[in-house]
Image (cartoon, grey):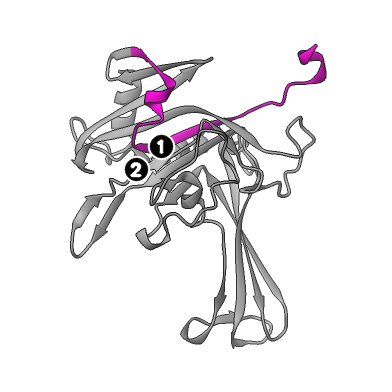
Amino acid sequence: RFFVNAVWKHSLLFGARKQQDANEFLNFYLGRVDDELKPKDATTSVMMDLFGLDQYQEVQCDECKTVTKRTEPLLGLVLSLPNESDVGVTDGKAGMTDGDAVNGNDIHLLDCFKSLQATGRFVGENQFYCDICQAKKDAEWRVTLQRRPQSLLISLRRTLWNKEKGLHKDKRMVKFPVELDATDLLEVGKTKVPDEDFEGCHYKLAAVVSHSGSTPIVGHYICYARNGNKWFLFNDSSVTSVMESSVLDVQPFILLYERREIPSVNDEI
């Protein structure tokens, strides 16, 4: 109750007894806590250490070969669901474990990562302005994700708007694994540190937020969370035990993965 009252006090966006967007609330909460905990003039923070990633972009001019670089820090990821024409092109190998295979036109979480990992060309009317050439030039761009946080927070962009449907909810099912190998998804980046998972990047599912309802402004949010090897459903004041298989059948809005430590030799003896 005190937490909810504090949210109402510090943000006019989240009024009482109104349907709210879980992604908007999560962004507000993480940003506010980050501001509160970050020391003045600090280059990093507790929240960035826990959830921080870097979206790294390189653009290389075809004429002078100069590479322009830009890094944007992120507290978690917001992924778009792919266009229907792009669904099913994932090879189903990287990042997936046994039992995670998808069929037909199912969307897998790995398909959604493609919106933040891509290469392309700036040509024609979309040429890149090169500061060295002082003119618009054809260029090649590349976007990658860097840093490997302890907690990988993934929000799926399901609240959409267009002229035909107005504000609506993308109800398509996204399959997600319990064990996520993000080695090929997240590069080490500048914050490279020697840890037990240094050569790889392995995560285990810790929580899932789901939404029931026909539109983004009507419905109900529930959360599934793991404690050890047991899963629980949090539905308002009710907490019940559930099977892991039922968790994997829900329509995810937000996913939380925890970095998995690789057992040491001593642990195996």
Amino acid type, residue under disc 1 in the picture = Ile
Residue farthest to the front, as pictured: 104
Is 42 in front, or is 267? 267
- Rendered position, 106 above or below 14: below
Q: Quadrant of the N terminus?
A: top left
Please provide the residue range marked out in magenta: 240-269
Q: Where is residue 155? Give x, y as percent.
A: 42, 42
Q: Where is residue 206? Give x, y as percent.
A: 50, 26
User: What numbered label is drawn on residue 50?
Assistant: none
Label 1 SS: strand
Q: Is residue 254 magenta?
A: yes
Classify mark 1: residues with Cα within 10 Å, few (<14), some (14-19) or many (20+): many
Horizontal side of residue 138 vs 267, given as left or right: left
Q: Is residue 242 magenta?
A: yes
Is 6 in front, or is 142? 142
Q: Which residue, given by chain and number where applicable, does mark 2 sit on?
A: 173
Classify mark 2: residues with Cα within 10 Å, few (<14), some (14-19) or many (20+): some
State the image quarter where residue 165 is shown. Answer: bottom left
Residue in the image at 40% along x and 18% along y: 243
Camera-near label (2 vs 1) is 2
Horizontal side of residue 99 vs 191, given as left or right: left
Cα distance between the residues tagged 2 and 1: 13 Å
Q: Earlier in the sequence, mark 2 or mark 1?
A: 2
Q: Where is residue 118? Give x, y as percent.
A: 56, 62
State the image quarter where residue 201 is shown. Answer: top right
Q: Which residue, given by chain and number where applicable, does mark 1 sit on?
A: 254
Q: Quadrant of the C terminus?
A: top right
Amino acid type, residue under disc 2 in the picture = Met
Residue in the image at 27% along x and 37% along y: 14
State the image quarter where residue 199 is shown. Answer: top right
